[in-house]
Structure formats: structure tokens, C-alpha cells
Image: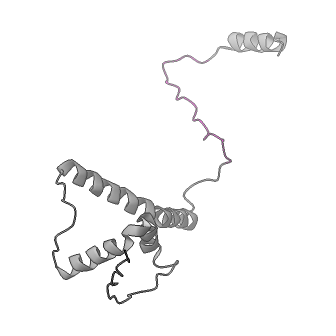
Amino acid sequence: MPKKNKSKRAFKLIAFKAYYDTDQDILDWWESIEEGERSDALRDLIREQLGIRRKSKAPIIDLPELLEVRRDTLWIRDALNDMPAFLERIIQHVAANGVVQSMAVGQHPPRTSPSVTRDEPALTDDDAERRTKRMRKATW
């Protein structure tokens, strides 16, 4: 039996450029979509912007918890995308104001000596001499 040629749907290709320096958020979103779903995602976004509601092929599951997870995920993604610029602003502010002393990696900040209250008696001369003699005898 001969195969029936299925007629192809007519279409118009709509394309635009996304630049790595200014549109990285769009490019990240684009790469996060599976390849077979990208056109549908763009159609949905354009229709949503136009205010056109179209019946979807799959039923929408309405779970408030899922919407909350989605909102939280989007917030985290936005925060992570904004973090490099935020850290750069902090570093520039610190560099401009000289707020932080430079420290080596692993070095701890200096400890302050405990405050001495006036109720504690100072070492007497005999106590200080005894301590000095003990220190001389100590083997390190």
C-alpha cells in the first residue's frame, strides 16, 4: 500500500539575536528548556504577553505547594544571577573606603586581651620573682 504524503504545515520563522554580554539571563533560560519544548515555551510567553489564553494540550495541575516551590526557585535563581554584581559592588565599596584590613587565608583576627577589673590584686614582687624562677627552670 502506498504511503500517503502528509502535507507539511505552513510556517514563518521568527528569529532574534541574544547577546552573551547583555542577554545572559535569556540564554540561561533558553538552555534550561529541553530542545523539543523551546518553540512551545516561546509561543506561550508571546501569547501570555498578548493576553491571549489558549487551551493547553495537557491539563494544568493546580497545587499551591507547587506554585510556592516555583516562586522560591525563581527567587533563588534571580538571587544567584544577581550575586556576582552584588559582590562586585561590595568589593568596590570596601576598596574605596578601606574598611577591612587585609588578612592571609586561614589567619584569625587578633584577640583582644581580657579586661582586668580593679578587684583583682596585681602580682606582688615575691610572686613575680617566683614566677620568673619557675620559667627559667621550665624545659620547653
Whether residue 44 sits left or right of residue 105 in the image: it is: left
Residue 140: x and y in percent read 82, 16
Q: Is residue 105 magenta?
A: yes
Residue 20: x and y in percent read 52, 77
Whether residue 42 sits left or right of residue 93 in the image: it is: left
Residue 99: x and y in percent read 54, 58
Whether residue 51 sits left or right of residue 13 in the image: it is: left
Magenta stretch: dominant secondary structure: loop
What residue do we see at 19% from left, 59% from top?
60
What residue do we see at 36% from left, 75% from top?
39
Residue 83: x and y in percent read 46, 61
Quick one: 100 or 85, which is closer to the camera?
85
Q: Is residue 106 magenta?
A: yes
What residue do we see at 23% from left, 54% from top?
67
Total numbered badges shown on the rendered structure: 0
Magenta residues span 104-122
Q: Is residue 77 above or below residue 140?
A: below
Q: Quadrant of the N terminus?
A: bottom left
Outermost residue to the front = 1
What residue do we see at 19% from left, 54% from top?
61
In which image quadrant can residue 77 be found? bottom left
Whether residue 40 sits left or right of residue 63 in the image: it is: right
In which image quadrant can residue 75 be found? bottom left
What colouring style does the render use?
one colour
Quick one: 110 or 42, which is closer to the camera?
42
